[in-house]
Image (cartoon, helix red, strand yellow):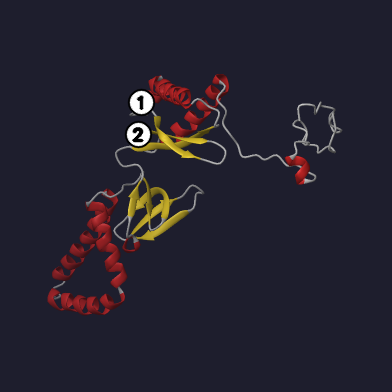
Amino acid sequence: LIAVFSGIGEVSIVLIVLFSILSVLNIPIAPVLAGFGIVGVAVGFGAQYLIRDLISGVFIIMENQYRVGDVARVANVSGLVEKITLRKTVLRDLDGIVHHIPNGEIKVASNFTKNYSRVNMNISVSYGTNLDHAILVVNRVGEELAREEYWRDIIISAPKVLRVDNLGDSGIDLKIMGDVKPIKQWEVMGELRLRLKNTFDAEGIEIPWPHMKVFFGDPQQIVAGLACPSCAHVNPPGSKFCAGCGVSLAAQ
């Protein structure tokens, strides 16, 4: 905001100095202003987009929609706001690419970091997991994180399980949410994932992953139960031991 008004001030000073010089030289100012008016009309036809950008920039600044240092999505581009002028907004995305966006092109502006940010993540557990136990573990890890010296100044409300979010193909998704200081949600989520993985390992809670078991051979033999439960080798009807690994097939 300071930079914007500084630029306006510089232009105003230049105009005042110009008119003062004309006055000292006894050059009539009225014809000059009239000339500016004619030029303004001519330029106005070709400067409609510029005027639109400037008006949009005024509203962006006066309404404090986003500021330098915020993370925002404007005109379908997301990134860190590096500069705001009356004409354009400058964003730098995660790849380091700088985007110059005319303010008149901005129809929707989404500010990810105004006042506070939110941890919003899912973690999956296997279908054999005791969900009540898993939820208690997740909430405990979130509370422990929020109490630690470094993190307590960042975390506003401890991350905890909000709900069972989805019954997926390979596991059950738990929705975790919590409020943190602006721009700190990614740091908190990274630390939380690390701690949840270590705690799940210690508690015997399995994080599922998609996998499949492939059987080779006659489907009728597989249905008949002659596929070895250990190595999936398909044995001929009447086999007592698996030809692939030697496991007894008597129970089949």
Q: Nearer the viewer, residue 120 or 35?
A: 120
Give the mark nearer the N terminus: 2 vs 1: 1
Q: Is residue 187 left or right of residue 19?
A: right
* Element class at badge 2: loop
Q: Is residue 161 above or below residue 28?
A: above
Q: Is residue 48 left or right of residue 219?
A: left
Residue displayed at 38% across by 20% down = 147
The spot of residue 34 in percent (x, y) is 16, 78
SS state under label 1: loop
Between 33 and 191, the residue placed more toward the observer is 191
Depth check, front residue: 141 or 100: 141
Tell me if label 2 and label 1 are in contact, CB under 8 Å. Answer: yes
The quarter in which the C terminus is drawn is: top right
Q: Residue at x 54, y 32 (%)?
A: 127
Q: Which x, y percent locates residue 209?
A: 60, 36
State which quadrant residue 187 falls in.
top left
Asked whether, in this view, residue 97 is left or right of residue 160, the answer is right
Q: Amino acid at mark 2?
A: Lys
Quadrant of the image occupied by residue 116: top left
Say which amino acid is labelled 1. Answer: Asp
C-alpha gap between disc 2 and disc 1 = 8 Å
The residue labelled by disc 2 is: 181
Residue at horizontal 41 percent and vertical 52 percent from the top:
91
151 w.r.t. 78: above or below:
above
Q: Which residue is mark 1?
A: 153
Label 2 CA crowd tier, 10 Å (few <14, some 14–19, many 20+): some
Residue at 49% from the left image edge and 47% from the top image edge: 94
Residue 76: mark in rendering:
none
Task: Provide residue 176's location: percent of width, then percent of height.
Answer: 42, 33
Residue 172 at x, y percent in the picture = 50, 35
Using the image, determine if residue 214 lies above or below residue 106.
above
Q: Residues within 10 Å of mark 1 (few under 14, many from 20)?
A: few
